[in-house]
Image (cartoon, rainbow, N blue to C red):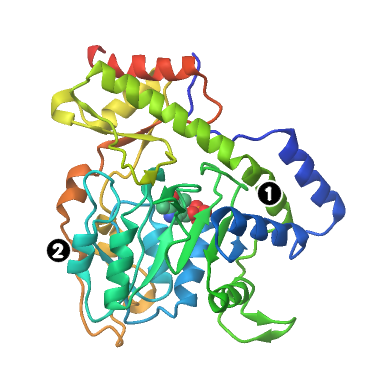
Amino acid sequence: MKIIKVAQPWVGREEVKAVQEVILSGRYISGLKVEEFERRFADYLGTRYAVAVNSGTAALHIALAVLGIGPGDEVIVPPLTFFSTVSAVLHQNSIPIFADIDPESYCLAPQDVEKKISSRTKAIIPVHLYGNSAEMKDIMQLARRYRLKVIEDAAQAHGTEYKAKKVGSIGDIGIFSFFATKHMTTGEGGMLVTNNKKYADLARMIRSHGLIGRDRHHYLGYNYRLSEIAAAMGLVQLKKLERANQKRIKNSLYLIKKLEKKRIPWIKTPKLAKHIKHTFFWCPICIDEKKLGMDTKSLVEALAKKGIETRHRYWEPLYKQKILLQKNAYPKGFPFNSKHYKKSIDYHKVYLQNAEKISGKVIGLPNHAMLTKQDLDIVVEKLIKIKAG
Ligand SMILES: *Cc1c(COP(=O)(O)O)cnc(C)c1O
């Protein structure tokens, strides 16, 4: 049986050649490939600066450090995202505060963000989920009004546009991931983008042990550098990104149109906003379990048995993760019991209506650049026949 995979990197001889050249050159760190990758990524995004790092999570951590967010501070995050949006906040000894999502875009709902702002709030991290964009105009307005920083988590949205601006370039800092399944990949890798020179300079320092020069350590830093090998692959992938995105979009619109035509009562296709260029990190559909007569997990398993791989994300709001419920972050109760945080938080009491309703019911259908029209037809056929067994 042919397996249709939900994610597959679009790679070939060009990546092999680029990586091979670096390997044979003998220079693996802090060289010209990383610099060129940063310059080209900044050009692509329309920002002044880009700083390459070795994961999207590292980029998030550096972004929070650069903005001076630390003990006693609160950062507003969405409940449906990959966990590193939340863990990066904990890494800085800050407190993640969850705001609800918009039921159509699955991204942060600005009205609820405003309700969660307190005197301790320092930043908002909108996540551009599944290749969509959060409502950035409203979020930036809130940020200005309450003097908050905005870090855009665009790890699933390389090339997504909000009102003709690339996401990641709108807030104070934007971050991207080049993990194997993302729109473009370097195996592991990430990028931080900004228009602020101070932020970019500090980010470069924190990326490499807080170093100035060769042996002066001015800040608490980490080893978050990207290798030349990864950057060489990234340069090739970046060149292909627009073409890969066009295919993702075309494939997703084909799936959506076909599903809408069939009027399957248990499938809700994504609602596309006119002011957003969605780049579809998978093609997300929402399942009405009652109408289907089966839970989403069983649907995903049934599809896998028929050779269709899908993604079941995110299956519960992140405030239900044990690390938060039991406050298992740093030893001795940090950061939750830090004397700088004069409040106490109990994640058992968090309940966000839209996140509760939607989590576990969204699945991502395959839409990557390697799929043929015939593959997409098979996905639709097998999906809509699932009820019949
Ligand atoms: C993938 C992802 C990250 C983390 O990126 P890594 O490169 O895997 O560290 C962060 N946020 C979101 C929304 C992601 O999808």
Neighbor class of circle 2 (other Cα within 10 Å; few <14, some 14-19, many 20+) is few
Q: Where residue 362 sits in the image (x, y, percent)?
A: 29, 37
Mark identifier at residue 235: 1
Q: How far apart in space, not on screen, are marks 1 and 2 (Cα)?
A: 46 Å
Does 229 sit left or right of 97 as displayed?
right
Rendered view: 331 above or below 161? below
Q: Where residue 132 sits in the image (x, y, percent)?
A: 37, 45
Q: Where residue 378 sits in the image (x, y, percent)?
A: 41, 15
Q: Amino acid at mark 2?
A: Lys
Secondary structure state at the residue bearing disc 2: helix
Q: Where residue 224 sits in the image (x, y, percent)?
A: 60, 66
Does 191 sit left or right of 33 as displayed?
left
Which image quadrant for residue 136?
bottom left
Q: Which residue appears at 30% of the width and 51% of the height?
A: 107
**Total number of numbered discs in the rendering:** 2
Secondary structure state at the residue bearing disc 1: helix
Task: Please state which of residues 364 and 387 is positioned toward the viewer in this rendering.
Answer: 364
Q: Amino acid at mark 1?
A: Leu
Which image quadrant for residue 352?
bottom left
Residue located beneath label 2 in the image = 349
Residue 170 in sight here? yes
Residue 96 in sight here? no
